[in-house]
Structure formats: structure tokens, C-alpha cells
Image (cartoon, grey):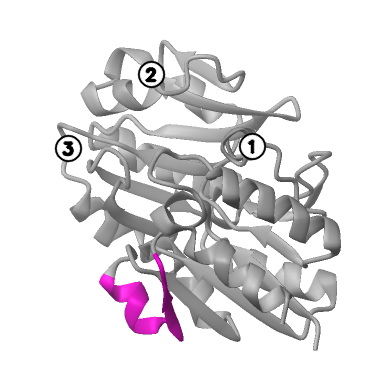
Amino acid sequence: MKTLYLSDLDGTLLTPAQNLSPYAARTLRRLIREGLPFSYATARSRVTASVVTQGICPRLPAVYHNGIFLTQPATGRVVRFWGFTPREQKDLLDCLLSEGVCPIVYGLQEGRERFFWLEPMAGENLSAFLATRPDDPRRTPLSAPEGYYGPSAYYFTCIEDQVPLLPLYRILRERFYCIYGNDLYSGKPWLEILPKQASKATAALALKQWTGAEELVCFGDGINDLPLFEIADRCYAVENACRELKEKADGILPSNREDGVVRFLEEEWEK
């Protein structure tokens, strides 16, 4: 049986320091070289994922931005893409701005990935997030709200310290795919908004079909991995995973501090 292995990154494959341990990096490189059908599904972009994975480059496409992109990690060639319609983008921006929310909007401008934010409205939480990406070539600050409406948007992130995000989540989830929870590293409330048809699950099923795999095995730790677990043939949560994900899992692996996923992959591949 041909099996596809698909892992989340932050909190699952990566250590709490947002990197791969020397053992994990060395072992994954060897397993991929030997032909392990492995890739990852992450909320990160290809830009930031390539940094934290330390040169681990799956031969298969990877899932980025929680399922917006299915892209070849090495070349950046987009295999599948799910974005907002112009009407959805306008309605979403009108709603958020009217509530005083300053979102980070990820979009395509002249064919290039960018992320936009309204600089005069940036609060403490948003500013702290931006400080972690000082050299990101996608950074595009805006001086006026009108700038949000030009690019073709595919992903919204709201990191507010003034506006409660939970009521917005309850409203917007009827029309969009929304993820609400606390950020893994900062602990601050986050609201992520994607097109309704986009999720890690949608992209994972497309990848499974693309590879011709008969079995999909997934690994994760967070709420955004729940759709992935619901469509997996086998799914494993790491010990540090949230309770909801552990309840869905077929098994619990050692934590991301202990490289539970890589140890599982090594043992299963070498059986």
C-alpha cells in the first residue's frame, strides 16, 4: 500500500524553539533521500517554512497557509490554489474595518506574494508579530484602508489587543473557514480567516490524489489540524497537542520536544 505522510510544523515537527533538532533534520533528510513519501501542512507561508525547516525539502508539494497553497517547496511552483472571490474580499474587509480590526491581509500583487497591514492602526500584538519578520520581502505597510482592496487576497490574520475577536469568529464562520484560538508562541488570541473551500484537509486530499497514495497518515497538535485528522486514514497527535485533537487521534506520540513524529517515521519506514 502506498502511504503519504503529512505533518504539521509548529508544535508538531518543530521544537518549541521553532526549528528542527539536529536528529530530526538529519533523519528526515535521509528518509526523504531513501524515498519516504513525506511532506508537511502548515499555517506558514513557503517563505517562513523554508527557514524553520533548515533545508528539509520534500520532493512532494507541501500545504501552506492552512491549505490555501499546494506548492512545490523547492521551486515555488503552485500546484493548487484556493483564494477569495473579489466580492468575498470586499465584504470581509468592510466587516473587519467597520469593527476597528486591523487585519494582516495576505494577497497576490502583480503575481507576487505580499502581506499588508494598516500601519496607523497597528496595536501592540500586531506590532510584536511584525517584529518577528523584519526582513520578510512580503512586508507591505499601508497608510490608508483603501490599499487593502487592491491585491487579490487569500488569507486574513487578526491579532488584536483592543477588539474582542471571538464575536467576529462566530459571525464570520458561517461564510468563511475560520480558526480562532491562542497563538502557540505568544499566547495571544488570533483569528484566521480563509475561503470556505480552503483547509488543510482540502489540500491534503488533493495531494493524496496527486501522488496516487492509497493511505494518508497525518500528524498534528492544534485546532487547525482537526480537518486534517477527520479525513486521514490514520492520525497521530503529539503529547503536547490540544485536548480536542488528542480525542480524534488514533494514537499519541511523544511531544515535539522529543521528536515524536520523526521517531515514528523512522521506525515505520524501517520496518
Place of residue 224 in the rendered image (x, y in percent of width and height, measured from the top left): 42, 62
Q: Splitting the image into 4 quarters, where does residue 31 fall? A: bottom right
> In the rendering, which numbered label is found on residue 163?
3
Mark earlier in primary sequence (1, 3): 1
> In the rendering, which numbered label is found on residue 131?
2
Q: Residue at x 39, y 83 (%)?
A: 248
Q: Are marks 1 and 3 in contact (CB under 8 Å)?
A: no
Magenta region includes residue 245: yes
Which residues, given as a range, are shown in magenta?
A: 243-254
Q: Splitting the image into 4 quarters, where does residue 35 fall? A: bottom right
Provide the residue designation for mark 1.
54
Element type at marker 2?
Answer: helix
The crowd level at tag 2 (other Cα within 10 Å; few <14, some 14-19, many 20+) is few
> In the rendering, which numbered label is found on residue 259?
none
Amino acid under label 2? Answer: Ala
Place of residue 94 in the rendered image (x, y in percent of width and height, measured from the top left): 37, 38
Depth order, front residue of 102/74: 74
Instruction: From this view, report whether residue 186 is shown above or below residue 84.
Output: above
Residue 124 visible, this angle: yes
Q: Are marks 1 and 2 in contact (CB under 8 Å)?
A: no
Describe residue 263's horizontal placement relative to residue 260 as left or right: right
Amino acid under label 3? Answer: Val
